[in-house]
Image: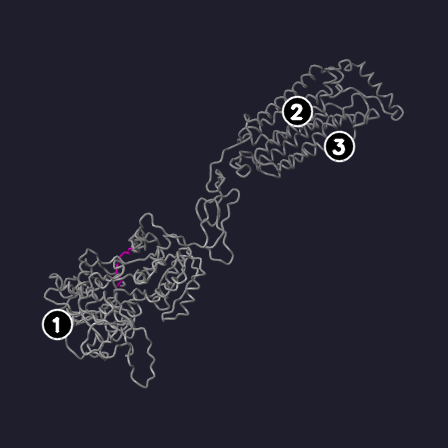
Amino acid sequence: MGWRLPGSSPRFERPGDVVLGGSFSILQFHGVVRLDFRSLPAGLPSSRVSRWGYRVAQCFVFAVEEINRNPHLLPNLTLGFSIRNSGDSVHGALHETMSFLTGQEDPVPNYVCQSGPPRAALVGDTRSALSVAMARLLGLYKFPQVSYSSTLPSLSDKTQFPSFLRTRISDFMSSRAVTQLVLHLGCSWVIILAQDDDFGQQASALAARELEEADICIEFHLPVPSQHSPEKISTVVQKMLTSTATGVLVFLSNCNFMLILQRLLGVHLLGQVWVSEGLLHTALALAMPGISQVLQGAFGLLCHGSRVRGFPEFFANLHPTRTPEDMFLGRFWEATFGCRWPHRNSTVAGDIWLCSGRESLRGHEHPFQSVSEMDIAYTAVYSVTHALQDLLSCEGGDGVCTDLQHFQPWQLLHPLRKVRFQTPDGTHIMFDANGDLVTTFDVFQGQQSPEGQFHFVHIGTVDPHRSPGDRMMIHLKDGVQVPSSVCSTSCEPGSSQIPQQGAPHCCFECRPCPEGQFANQKDMQSCRQCPEELYPSQTRDRCLPRTETFLAFDEPLGLALTLVVLALAGLACLVLGVFLRFRDTPVVRANNRALSYVLLASLALCALCPLLFLGRPSPTTCLLRQTTFAVVFTVAVSCVLAKTLTVVLAFRVTRPGQRVLMCLRPSASSSMVFVSSLMQVILCGAWLGTSPPFPQKDATSEPGHLVLLCQEGSGVAFSCVLGYLGLLAVGTFSVAFLARDLPDTFNETKFLTFSMLLFCSVWTAFLPLYHSARGKATVAVEVFSVLASTAGLLGGIFLPKCYLILLKPERNTLVGLRLAHQAQRVPRSHRNTGTPRFPAQYP
């Protein structure tokens, strides 16, 4: 075979009543055999000795010897072993497996040519690729296999691999653990380095899926070739140099990982956060000078396995002369001490030192021995031993047992899957339904000591079997320092993430929240609206309670408006008192006393209407404020219209007895006011009956305040009420404007025209101001419009009359009125000689 050494394969065997096989990668082969099929292959010499692999094999020997010394395990039986070298090769693993099954150097399948003690199980191998090939072969014979290091998830499939178990957690669970650790460390932007084989592809695919489900972005998913390829390794390193991610997930073999690190050390790429499901290759790589700078801050997971007591002393006492049957020890000795162990009938070149035999392994510890997992085969040996004891002693409790003479390897599978025991150091061992070990992970971090020494520190644990929901239980020590690995820095509270076009969701920009919105956590994808009773703070990172506000009586604006209301209402009442006091004077009688009294009373009520607009809105005030204002103002405008029409008709009547004289009667004016006001009352009643006004809270008008106001309910009804009032006002203004030039001392159309012009101007300006105002300003605009229009009517119509009554009493007599009338007619006689005198005085 091309993978083998010339001659017989090296093995290390000891006899026993039951033999346990072990497959280890001790002597490794890296050359490629090219067959020309014209001659037999010459074979490959080993290129190097795996000192770690030999230590794992010796831990296997240590466990067997410890079990043989234990009187409680396999009493009256001796456990033998057969250690074989797979050469880290699938060909080698299959050949040695078949050789162990058949007992032949050159095995013939399904043929056993030698008798001997029964073979119980096979422990091995290291890599998943080797264990898969072995498991397919051993599964055909239902021969138990317990791997100490293979982690490929497909090996948990009992349909494909019915006789395979392992004292490790599968890559499915470890990949989840790595992902959860990355998430716990706060990395959101990572690179995946995956071996281009079954192990790398399956493990990295599982990790990639877990990362995506956890919203962690992958910048590069880089495949690393299984075969040595400097060009492809250089391509991987170049992509890592262009990467902005500092978190690197590693799913590589030891060899490729060291090649990557060597290239990175040459270009001085520092600051990477290496996260691996194991620390074996990390520990091996640290033997390279200066590589600790690249691995500074590396994180790794180790299965919480058994810690073997006494093994360091056992290993330190090894010597080739004490165990000459160990064919691997000589090569290990040569690799450790850099000399050549003298062989019988062998010549040595002059530049090669011969080993003296006085060398000692004491003090030659493996680098980072505490995390190098050299004791991983220990648990596998004990698992087989306890299952074998349950089978032979019939202590399983399920009726499956046998004796040594009738022992068949397949009988060991059932008790092996059900085995539960405790190792000498107190570690509990059991398998799940898939034949995977039930255990936890220890988390280690590479740290630099104050003395400059690089070492791994235990910083926490990961329990994959106790997970609330989809999250594993992770416990890390306080103060663990982790460099950030993010595409974009976190968005602080008060801002949200804005994705970058064409980039992963981990790459974003931070934008402050707009007005009225907030973000109270980091990295929120969108800002949120505060509840109605709250408003965002100045930094937009929280919501604060709003202060209720309204146009109150006791605030400066409310107090000023209240004083104006009272003053204007008092003035209207004062004018009404003057008119009542001088009701028999010509000025009062000539201006239709009844309409004047009604008009003054309505103006007084109009002046008091703003009191309904001030203070906290309630359902009652909301119902009354607009309807009361509309009805009272309609009465006032109707009175003005009636007065205007009366004046116009009085001047236009030229022939006595006309039917239009009926309109000059006092009852006609009262009827006009009543009908006009009734129409407004009907409109207001329909408004209140269909969609009445109601109190409302306005959270948008004033930042930080909750404005209490009245919502008008039906906008159509409100527009109809205002439209009807506006129609009356425009009609009154039009009639008064057309009659403004009628002569006579008693003619008041000019004053009516001026007052209605003020009224219409105020309400014309009110409409745009009302729709543009917000919050309390809306109420202030309404109150100002009511007061201004009331003051315009009161001042334009009645103040000139009060001036005559109070300050010019001599003109408020019949003689004075005649003199004034005569003075008016002289300058106009040449252009209006046909105008009659005032026909009659108003009652």
Viewer-nearest of labels 2 and 1? 1
Quarter in which the C terminus is drawn: top right
Residue 437 within the magenta-colored segment of the rendering = yes
Quarter in which the N terminus is drawn: bottom left
- Identity, as a three-letter code, of the amino acid under mark 1: Gln
Residue 227 within the magenta-colored segment of the rendering = no
Kind of element beneath mark 1: helix
Residue picked out by circle 3: 734
In-front residue for pair 700/229 = 229
Label 2 neighbour load within 10 Å: few <14, some 14-19, many 20+:
many
Give, as a single range, the part of the protein colored magenta.
435-442
Instruction: Indicate which disc, 3 or 1, sits on the residue closer to the N terminus.
Output: 1
Relative height, residue 271 to residue 648 (above, below): below
Residue picked out by circle 1: 405
Q: CA distance from mark 2 to mark 1?
A: 124 Å
Per the picture, the main secondary structure of the magenta-coloured stretch is: loop
Residue 98, x across and y down, in percent: 24, 75
Relative height, residue 135 to residue 427 (above, below): below
Viewer-nearest of labels 3 and 1? 1
Q: How many marks?
A: 3
Kind of element beneath mark 2: helix
Residue picked out by circle 2: 603
Residue at 39 percent across and 57 percent down: it is 272
